[in-house]
Image (cartoon, coloured by chain):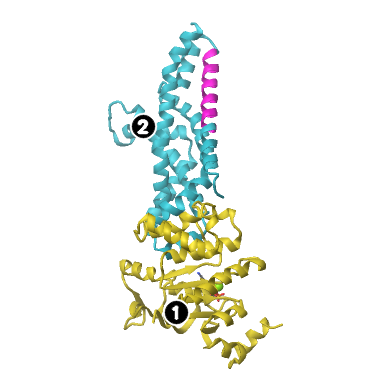
Chain colours: A yellow, B cyan
Amino acid sequence: MILEMNNIRKHFDDMEVLKDISFSVDSGEVVSIIGPSGSGKSTLLRCATFLETIDGGEIKYMGKTAAHTNDSGNAVYVSQQELHVFRNYCGLVFQHFNLCPHYSVLKNLIDAPVHVQHRSKDEAIDTAMELLQKMGIADRADAYPYQLSGGQQQRVAIARALAMKPDILFFDEPTSALDPELTGEVLKVIRQLAEEKMTMVVVTHEMPFAKAVSNRVLFMDGGVVVEQGDPHDVFDNPQEERTKQFLRVFER
Amino acid sequence: MEFSTMLSTMAPGMLRSVGIFTLTLLGALPLGMIVALLKKSRFVVVRAIIGAYISIIRGTPLMLQLLVWYFGPFYLFQMNIGDWRFPALILGFVVNYAAYFAEIYRGGIESIPVGQYEAAEVLGYSRAQTFMRIILPQVIKRILPAITNEVITLVKDTSLAFTLAYSEIFSLAKQISASQTSFTPFVIAGVFYFVANYVVAFVMSRIEKALDYYK
Ligand SMILES: Nc1ncnc2c1ncn2[C@@H]1O[C@H](COP(=O)(O)OP(=O)(O)O)[C@@H](O)[C@H]1O
Ligand SMILES: [Mg+2]
């Protein structure tokens, strides 16, 4: 298991956003998370990537515990230094890219490898150029983010996350901020990564994509996992009424 | 008095004005950043003290603040510190301008989208690295126009040093004008300030251009 999240609870103010969620991701697996807006999908990814702290439950990467619930029922995390190691296991691609506007594409890709992971600059550049090649934007290495289309920026963001060599990569609606004609190029690179057996968790509203690419689909609603399983089962033969209702909206 | 004599009598005053200007910037630009960061401290007491400092500085005239720095130690604490004129002057300017710069920095820091912090956190940057490598460069670009305004105001504010009878160009101009019954010293001082601000505007626009490579 790359990631195990058990009995995760999270609230904001007096609202329960994650209600006892458990899920795990195996090496090489691609898991899609679907569900209506406000169901807690982003919060789940943000807890998995340590941007938010959980109230209760357990987070494990590679069998090692990053957070667990103590006897009084509160979540406790490992120390900041240890958390640094856990952050290194995972990467996150945001809906709005969040590239550094003052860095060139190449600099966006090598800055963290060099200054956070203390890898050599030459090696980081080689890795970065290889990734840009794969993303089909090697010719834009010297461009600045503002000079790129949304689809190109998102591909740079994916390359930036991959440059850290994560064991698992999370995507939070990677195509939702893009014009419809640009979603294809981003989905294509994610699909390519899936073929290379990159472990990924993708929150998406692109149902055909989720069905084609993932090994497993999770349907979330109201802070719980309503249904999960093989994409063909969940999409073509959903068991739960709420899943059926949700999927009907995407049918034409 | 001949024009050239007048000019050479006033030249040291120009140097002193430039001195006040330079020392104020060297002190206030970094101090303002410290103040801005303290304003976001997690300790309520620190935030309250910084808040009070900024509102007092912004709510009272700089001229009055200079007098307090100069006469305060004696009247408030019966202290007699030899020749305190120049240090009091610079302290007054630095503490005053740091408050204004701090507000500019704070506005700039708060204008950076939260996504920049989140991306940095996921990538494993430390808090210091996030600030120095990712936030600060973007802040500097955004606040440059506001900083330019303050620096131009500072050029003119250096004339307030006459309050403490420090013989920078404006004090000298007043003295020479009175003793020579001539208007010329004021013209010289005026041209000096104008040229100084022209240089400031030129330098700042160069810096803005240099940061134009990204949006
Ligand atoms: N930082 C926050 N503070 C307060 N409420 C939040 C915060 N983040 C998310 N929420 C709330 O939590 C719920 C789940 O949000 P989110 O995880 O973003 O859902 P989704 O990604 O599925 O649309 C929503 O009702 C949202 O308003
Ligand atoms: Mg979301």
The reply to whether callout 2 and callout 1 are in contact (CB within 8 Å) is no
Q: Which residue is mark 2?
A: B88
User: Is residue B39 something one can see in this rendering?
Assistant: no
Dot 2 lies on which element? helix
Dot 1 lies on which element? loop
Q: Amino acid at mark 1?
A: Gly
Q: Residue A226: percent from the left, percent from the top?
A: 54, 88
Give the residue furthest to the top. B1
Between A19 and B77, the one nearer to me in the picture: A19
Between A142 and B87, the one nearer to me in the picture: A142
Looking at the rendered image, the quarter that the N terminus of chain A falls into is bottom left
**Vertical comparison of A82 with A238: above or below:** above
Q: Residues within 10 Å of mark 1 (few under 14, many from 20)?
A: some
Q: Residue A233: percent from the left, percent from the top?
A: 57, 91
Q: Chain of mark 1?
A: A
**Vertical comparison of A218 with B182: above or below:** below
Between B103 and A25, the one nearer to me in the picture: A25
Looking at the rendered image, the quarter that the C terminus of chain A falls into is bottom right
Per the rendered image, the range of residues in magenta is: B184-201
Q: Amino acid at mark 2?
A: Ala
Which of pointers 2 and 1 indicates the residue nearer the eye? 1
Q: Chain of mark 2?
A: B
User: Is residue A171 something one can see in this rendering?
Assistant: yes
**Vertical comparison of A168 with B51: above or below:** below
Q: Main secondary structure of the magenta part?
A: helix
In screen coordinates, is A154 left or right of B20? right
Q: Which residue is mark 1?
A: A28
Q: Are marks 2 and 1 on the same chain?
A: no
Mark 1: is the Cβ under 8 angstroms from ligand 1? Answer: no
Magenta residue check for B199: yes
Give the residue furthest to the right. A252
